[in-house]
């Protein structure tokens, strides 16, 4: 049996990590390093149910990992002697090159860096986390698991933008999709929960968090997804606009005299729910709505309207839908979002059981009626476990493959 797998998700100013028993699925320890590069850095660490915290300056990602690993030792677990089998890294963009878990080499790091042009907010931070962790654990396999990989199978008609083909080819412009690790994990869990063969199911998966995406999956293969070249396309999100008329970009450049960076910041960080009503946390949004805030009400209605459009589109794309699954922070916790997203669709065979939907249950569960032709579920996502299991295959007695070229 392999030892535990360390999973690292490195962001621009934060690092999430988990130490996972990939066989049993248990998170032995987990933590979050926040405000890297700021004087008021903080690390929250949990080891076997006990919480600890570090506060103080965190100069860079390498220092953040060093401090986090020291907290393991303080809590009673020395990572150096823990028998770590592999380190799995979440990487946002794999481009055309990476479409399955890949053992990290210097060439792979260089390629991930090159792909930063397609994910400038994410890939550079992923690389920093990889390089920092490889210095700490130089003798175990490091494995990259790509957010885009699951959507590598998108049919040509779903992945192709209708722009000049030569320009698109020269600059890697196509629909890649994101949150793929979550969509793949959740669709597999749906089959397990229902005791069905994944190969026989047509599924819609709705990953609804601060970032949000939808997917249409037939027989375990992705047929369409809402995110595109970048994670900006698709559903309305916490701070991202989702789908807009591309002409808005040119209009803002000419009319508001905003440069490319300002428009990028507006659409990625100052739009979505936050742009419409000033908040991007759904709990705060709900509080504002309950207090009669009209802007919050409109923001919620826009969010639901866009979500229903994608559900409708994927019902047509798949032709026959067996299941719809809600996952991630909003999808798993916002009762009203699930109810409103599927309201009035009984003629399409979709019936929500209101009591099941409102139940305070953290496990994967069915929330549709027994008579509903489409089974609707809430399935907690676990991207870290999926990454751990992928990385474990590259341990000395695993069966992983090398990088693709």
Image (cartoon, rainbow, N blue to C red):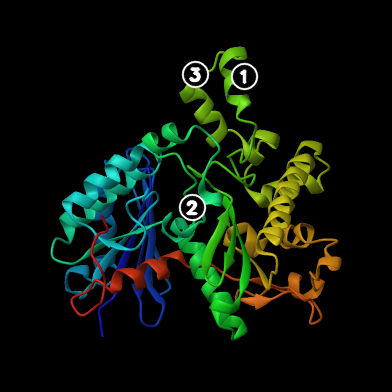
Q: Residue 379, labelled with which disc?
A: none
Q: Nearer the viewer, residue 137 or 115?
A: 115
> Would you say the residues marked 2 and 1 are in contact, meaning their CB atoms lie under 8 Å apart?
no
Q: Residue 178, labelled with which disc?
A: 2
Q: Quadrant of the C terminus?
A: bottom left
Q: CA distance from mark 3 to mark 1?
A: 11 Å
Tell me which numbered mark, 3 or 2, is placed earlier along the sequence. Answer: 2
* Residue at the image position 45 percent from the left and 62 percent from the top: 181
Tell me which numbered mark, 2 or 1, is placed earlier along the sequence. Answer: 2
Q: Nearer the viewer, residue 323 or 292?
A: 323
Q: Quadrant of the N terminus?
A: bottom left
Residue 323 sits in quarter = bottom right
Q: CA distance from mark 2 to mark 1?
A: 28 Å
Q: At numbered mark 3, what does the secondary structure look like: helix, strand or loop?
A: loop
The spot of residue 297 in percent (x, y) is 79, 43
* Residue at the image position 69 percent from the left and 69 percent from the top: 321
Q: Is residue 198 above or below residue 286?
A: below
Residue 89 sits in quarter = bottom left
Relative to residue 89, is residue 226 drawn left or right?
right
- Pointer 3 residue: 259
Relative to residue 127, is residue 217 drawn left or right?
right
| Residue 56 seen from this side | no
> Would you say the residues marked 3 and 1 are in contact, meaning their CB atoms lie under 8 Å apart?
no
Q: Nearer the viewer, residue 126 or 242?
A: 242
Tell me which numbered mark, 3 or 1, is placed earlier along the sequence. Answer: 1
How many marks can you see?
3
- Pointer 1 residue: 251
* Residue at the image position 17 percent from the left and 58 percent from the top: 136
């Amino acid at each position: 049996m392999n030892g535990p797998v360390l999973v690292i998700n490195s962001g621009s100013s934060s690092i999430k990590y988990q130490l996972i028993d990939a066989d049993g699925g248990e998170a032995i320890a987990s933590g979050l390093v926040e405000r890297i590069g700021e004087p008021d850095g903080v690390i929250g660490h949990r080891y076997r149910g006990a919480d600890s915290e570090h506060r103080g300056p965190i100069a860079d990602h390498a220092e953040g990992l060093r401090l986090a690993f020291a907290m393991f030792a303080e809590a009673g677990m020395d990572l150096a002697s823990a028998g770590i089998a592999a380190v799995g890294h979440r990487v946002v963009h794999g481009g055309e090159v990476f479409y399955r878990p890949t053992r990290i080499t210097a060439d792979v790091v260089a390629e991930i860096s090159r792909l930063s042009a397609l994910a400038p907010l994410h890939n550079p931070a992923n690389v920093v986390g990889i390089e920092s962790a490889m210095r700490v654990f130089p003798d175990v396999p490091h494995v990259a698991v790509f957010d885009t990989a699951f959507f590598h199978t998108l049919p040509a008609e779903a992945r192709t933008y209708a722009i000049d083909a030569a320009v698109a080819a020269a600059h890697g412009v196509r629909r890649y999709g994101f949150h793929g690790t979550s969509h793949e994990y959740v669709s597999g869990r749906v089959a397990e929960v229902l005791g069905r063969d994944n190969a026989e199911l047509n599924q819609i998966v709705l990953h609804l968090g601060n970032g949000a995406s939808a997917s249409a999956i037939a027989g375990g293969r992705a047929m369409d997804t809402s995110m595109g070249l970048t994670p900006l396309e698709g559903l309305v999100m916490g701070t991202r606009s989702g789908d807009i008329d591309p002409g808005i970009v040119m209009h803002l450049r000419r009319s508001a005299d905003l440069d490319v960076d300002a428009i990028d910041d507006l659409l990625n960080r100052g739009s979505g729910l936050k742009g419409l009503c000033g908040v991007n946390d759904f709990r705060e949004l709900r509080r504002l709505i309950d207090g009669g805030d009209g802007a919050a009400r409109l923001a919620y209605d826009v969010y639901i309207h866009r979500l229903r459009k994608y559900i409708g589109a994927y019902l047509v794309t798949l032709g026959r839908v067996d299941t719809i699954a809600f996952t991630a922070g909003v999808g798993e916790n916002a009762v009203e979002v699930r109810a409103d997203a599927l309201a009035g669709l009984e003629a399409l065979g979709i019936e929500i059981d209101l009591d099941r939907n409102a139940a305070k249950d953290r496990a994967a569960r069915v929330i549709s009626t027994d008579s509903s032709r489409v089974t609707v579920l809430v399935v907690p996502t676990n991207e870290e476990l999926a990454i751990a299991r992928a990385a474990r295959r590259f341990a000395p007695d695993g069966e992983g493959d090398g990088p693709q070229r």
